[in-house]
């Protein structure tokens, strides 16, 4: 018996989803003799799934031209669809439109009634989604779905179910859209679809669930995506995105070291791929929460370079750095530019936090009211917890501690139910302020202590420093007889902040800060900021 050829071994590797091996073997086979169109398609898909989109595009183009030579118009159009489908992820919209126009022209000239008309329509609908026209995208996906049903084409049926679901969600008809996502996922789990379609449906469904704050579905489908990716160790594009989704869920549940590992692996796995921006953003979020501000800044910038919006994380970073006005400007611009309700909701929660820090209670109230209105339209516990948290913080800022306490207690309960320890601890800090405002210092201390313990366990250094400043007694922790406000000022001074930055952080005037700095110098018997900084570090006052 003769040994299997590279072509035979390449086909076998493709059948068992060994994508890099299949790419290598089929490429080797092509050096020996030209590949037939079936094998060119295998090579193109194996190249895409192993992270070589450049080779995939080149091979699909050759397959398209070969089909044109032999007069196989439907297959030539199918290649044009796959090229456009892949190029969307890279943002090469001019090329996408070029391949779509060619596909339409070939179909119009041939007059054929074939399933490829549905694929071209589906691609048109995807472009309408990217352009924000949800009504037109829904109509076009529906037209494509009818063709898919008529030709009994599983890939097209599943893709259009996903597309119609996403379009309905974008239109605010979440109750109608989510069942269509589930329908698409049934096709995925039943093994009916080609691998590129499977990966797209998995990722798009998880993204949609996160956008509508459906944590249960996002968790369930992320686990399924993880299992699918683990069964294909050589899978690159979807495996990296899976790691990002896992990192987001781990972060929410307080598993920050695991989330950091997954985000780092996602950055490595997606290096050079379109989805790497979301991986960098997730990495930045973990750095920010831990107080690793320089690393967070670098990761937010990398996310932005790869087309991922660095907000609201970057605005929250500026707030943590004491750059309150920069945070206000960034979050206001981002909210003004966001028109989708679900995208706005994440930004609004951050806007409430930033505006309250800036002393703009009225602006924070407007943002919180809009967030409450959005949350009222969705059965999404995560979104409702965010809205209650923001509303309670505004009530506290408005000087209504009793109403704030009731709302924040509801938010805290929701965060606990969602198993979100960091957010629950933040709610307890606000509850501690409520207790202080009504004169219940013992309860305030207990709330702060409970939050401090969680921040310690998580490694949330900035939050831990803030809550410790709230509970520190001057006699025990402030050598030199510094007042509570002077403790806050010297801690910020020791971070290298200017008087203006300290004033913004503490929402007081720059003149008041200068007076506090002068008093600190007198009490500590120092004559410079560097000497005061050294004193702060020596005596544990720097945080």
Image (spheres, rainbow, N blue to C red):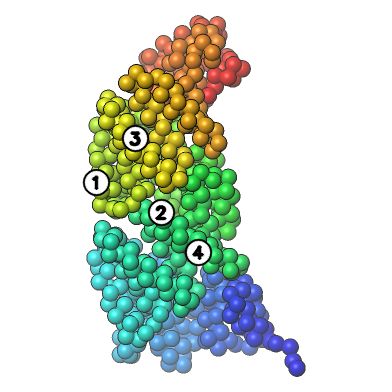
Residue drawn at point x = 48 percent, y = 55 percent: 245
Give SS at disc 2. Answer: helix
Q: Nearer the viewer, mark 3 or mark 1?
A: 3
x and y percentages locating residue 320 in the rendered image: 45, 32
Q: Nearer the viewer, mark 2 or mark 4?
A: 2
Residue drawn at point x = 58 percent, y = 86 percent: 35
x and y percentages locating residue 260 in the rendered image: 56, 47
Write down the residue under mark 4.
225
Q: Distance from label 3 to label 1 (Cα)?
A: 17 Å
Earlier along the polypeptide chain: callout 3 or callout 1?
1
Write down the residue under mark 2.
215
> Residue 525, located in which quarter of the rendered image?
top right
Give SS at disc 3. Answer: helix
Give SS at disc 4. Answer: helix
x and y percentages locating residue 347 in the rendered image: 35, 44
374 relative to 141, above or below? above
Earlier along the polypeptide chain: callout 3 or callout 4?
4
Crowding near pointer 4: few (<14 within 10 Å), some, many (20+)?
A: many
Write down the residue under mark 3.
408
Return the mark for residue 41: none
Earlier along the polypeptide chain: callout 4 or callout 1?
4
Q: Nearer the viewer, mark 2 or mark 1?
A: 2
Crowding near pointer 2: few (<14 within 10 Å), some, many (20+)?
A: some
445 relative to 336 in the view: left or right: right
Write down the residue under mark 1.
373
């Amino acid at each position: 018996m003769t040994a299997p050829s590279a072509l035979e071994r390449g086909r076998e590797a493709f059948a068992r989803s060994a994508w890099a091996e299949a790419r290598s073997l089929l490429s080797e086979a092509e050096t020996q003799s030209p590949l037939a169109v079936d094998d060119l398609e295998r090579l193109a898909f194996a190249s895409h799934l192993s992270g070589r989109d450049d080779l995939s595009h080149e091979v699909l183009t050759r397959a398209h031209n070969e089909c044109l030579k032999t007069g196989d118009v439907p297959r030539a159009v199918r290649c044009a669809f796959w090229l456009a489908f892949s190029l969307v992820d890279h943002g090469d919209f001019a090329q996408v439109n070029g391949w779509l126009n060619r596909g339409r022209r070939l179909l119009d000239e041939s007059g054929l009634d074939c399933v490829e008309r549905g694929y071209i329509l589906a691609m048109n609908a995807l472009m309408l989604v990217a352009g924000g026209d949800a009504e037109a995208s829904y109509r076009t996906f529906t037209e494509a779905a009818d063709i898919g049903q008529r030709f009994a084409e599983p890939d097209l049926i599943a893709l259009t179910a996903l597309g119609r679901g996403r379009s309905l969600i974008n239109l605010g008809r979440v109750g109608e859209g989510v069942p269509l996502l589930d329908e698409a996922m049934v096709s995925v789990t039943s093994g009916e679809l080609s691998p590129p379609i499977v990966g797209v449906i998995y990722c798009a469904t998880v993204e949609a669930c996160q956008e509508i704050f459906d944590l249960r579905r996002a968790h369930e489908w992320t686990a399924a995506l993880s299992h699918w990716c683990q069964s294909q160790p050589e899978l690159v594009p979807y495996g990296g995105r899976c790691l990002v989704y896992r990192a987001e869920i781990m972060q929410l549940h307080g598993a920050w070291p695991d989330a950091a590992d997954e985000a780092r692996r996602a950055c490595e796995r997606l290096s050079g791929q379109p989805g790497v921006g979301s991986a960098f953003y997730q990495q930045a979020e973990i750095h920010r929460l831990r107080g690793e501000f320089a690393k967070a800044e670098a990761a937010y910038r990398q996310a932005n370079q790869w087309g991922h919006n660095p907000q609201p994380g970057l605005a929250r970073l500026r707030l943590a750095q004491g750059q309150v006005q920069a945070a206000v400007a960034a979050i206001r611009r981002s909210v003004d530019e966001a028109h989708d309700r679900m995208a706005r909701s994440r930004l609004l929660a951050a806007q409430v936090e930033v505006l309250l820090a800036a002393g703009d209670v009225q602006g924070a109230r407007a943002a919180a009211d809009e967030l409450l209105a959005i949350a009222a339209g969705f059965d999404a516990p995560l979104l409702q917890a965010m809205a209650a948290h923001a509303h309670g913080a505004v009530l506290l800022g408005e000087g209504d501690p009793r109403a704030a306490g009731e709302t924040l207690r509801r938010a805290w309960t929701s965060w606990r139910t969602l198993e979100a320890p960091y957010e629950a601890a933040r709610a307890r800090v606000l509850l501690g302020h409520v207790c202080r405002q009504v004169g219940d210092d013992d309860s305030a201390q207990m709330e702060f202590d409970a939050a401090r313990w969680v921040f310690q366990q998580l490694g949330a250094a900035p939050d831990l420093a803030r809550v410790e400043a709230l509970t520190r007694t001057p006699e025990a922790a402030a050598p030199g007889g510094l007042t509570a406000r002077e403790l806050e000022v010297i801690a910020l001074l020791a971070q290298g902040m200017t008087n203006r930055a300290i004033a913004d952080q503490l929402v007081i005037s720059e003149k008041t800060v200068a007076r506090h700095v002068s008093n600190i110098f007198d009490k500590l018997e120092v004559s410079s900021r560097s000497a005061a900084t050294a004193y702060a570090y020596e005596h544990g006052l720097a945080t």
